[in-house]
Amino acid sequence: MKYISTRGDAPHLTFEEAMLTGLALDGGLYVPESVPTLGQGEIAALAGAPYEEIAYRVMAPFVGDCFTEDELRGAIARAYEGFGHDARAPLVQLGPNHFLLELFHGPTLAFKDFAMQIIGQLFQIALKRRGERVTIVGATSGDTGSAAIEAFRGLDNVDVMILYPHGRVSEVQRRQMSTPVEANVHALALDGDFDDCQAAVKDMFADVAFRDEVGLAAVNSINWARVLAQVVYYFSSALSLGAPERAVSFTVPTGNFGDIFAGYIAKRMGLPIAKLVVATNRNDILHRTLETGRYQKEGVSPTISPSMDIQVSSNFERALFDAYGRDGAAVAQLMAELKSAGGFPVSQGAIEVLREVYASGRASEEETSATITAMRARTGEVLCPHSAVGVKVAEELLGAEPMITLATAHPAKFPDAVEAATGLRPPLPSRMSDLYDRPERITRVPNDLSEIERVIREMRRT
């Protein structure tokens, strides 16, 4: 299995190389040269299997011979043994034909744990075998950073630097990044929004001298291994509702497009998915693009669902790559226009391809809060604001197939928004009950590439 860049001008890599590299040298994102498929019999045979077994069967064809069966199975087992629910990703019924996929039972209470925990294990195996050390730099709108720090804290061959937008994440998200005591993990509060954090990371990867000097690696959603690990819960949840004999649909609250792109990969693998619905908050660039055929930045507005406060959706580049017939030069041109002009028109052929795969909707702040209130009253389920965005959009698009909405975070990560909508302040799980009492360690950085690079040089262990 080889991996190629969405911009068509970078070396082809193995799974391990793509995982350790993150962003391609040409600025593109790695995708598999071809998508392996599972036959209907192979999918049906996974019904009732433990989550770990489904994970192995889904991931192994993409990994190839980079890891032995024992290495991959062992990494998967260690990744999920600390989750707070034996099903790992349990389903809860909200109403007729509508189900909630709870993806918040991992160590940092967010869906990012499903990918980050396995990446931490695979990085450790690969780096130990190679005798190498790396500096992981990531951008987060809230959950990726805490999941990365949790997965890599204390490892000898990895330093982790996470950029997050100062003042634009929840207190729980910030504290999950700033309270770990291990010397190899650092929370960097950047003066700007998430798009500024993401741009800084991409610029660091483009700075080849710096990249080589510090051994730069990335584990945020640009990393293919992240997308792959998220494919698994599409299979596990669909199997629970009768797949492959019955098609299912998914609604995904998303800002950076990685989670829903994982659903697209599941569909390409053979999982019968009827609809993939993109759910956005008022920072609705993805919804607007699918409606109008133009991808255009309009600035980021802070919301009660901050992990979706994004205007540059990195993983959308992967979707564009397939929509443009895997024409890397065309994608490179679009990305250049985005950087220079803040947007670009999607060709008629490409937008038609995208609309065949994805539907979309948006939720205002008022609608998000109202959904939290209504679900608490109607079902007893307490939603985080991101999950509420998904539920609101999903209820508008329910059809003949079961709809699964992804619940991306525990409500206790956003207690102010939940309390305002329900009068209930959701408590943290007991294992995290002292989070507000732990001392924080934060480094404030300006939105200046040279200064960020200086800080990273000084912080990394040699």
Image (cartoon, rainbow, N blue to C red):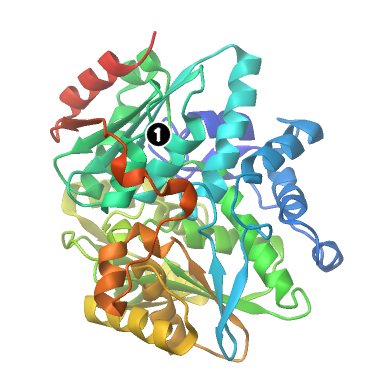
Q: What element carries label 1?
A: loop
* Any part of residue 23 in sight: no
Res 161 → quadrant:
top left
Give the number of marks.
1
- Left or right: where 217 falls relative to 20: left
Q: For the N terminus, give its image quadrant.
A: top right
**Relative to residue 46, is residue 82 depicted above or below?**
above
Residue 103 is situated, as x and y percent measured from the top left of the image, at 53, 60
**Relative to residue 454, is residue 138 depicted above or below?**
below
Q: What residue type is labelled 1?
A: Asp
What crowding class fits label 1: few (fewer than 14 Cα within 10 Å), some (14-19), or many (20 or more)? some
Res 42 → quadrant:
bottom right
- Left or right: where 376 falls relative to 38: left
- Left or right: where 369 falls relative to 57: left
Of residues 228 and 208, the one nearer the viewer is: 228
Mark 1 = which residue? 26
Q: For the C terminus, give its image quadrant.
A: top left
**Relative to residue 8, is residue 101 depicted above or below?**
below
Residue found at x 52% / y 42%: 116
Residue 124 is situated, as x and y percent measured from the top left of the image, at 59, 25
> Which residue reaches farthest top?
462
Residue 248 is situated, as x and y percent measured from the top left of the image, at 64, 78
Of residues 381 and 54, the one nearer the viewer is: 381
- Left or right: where 104 falls relative to 53: left
* Any part of residue 416 in sight: yes
Res 178 → quadrant:
top left
Residue 238 is situated, as x and y percent measured from the top left of the image, at 68, 71
Residue found at x 28% / y 71%: 419
Residue found at x 36% / y 57%: 413
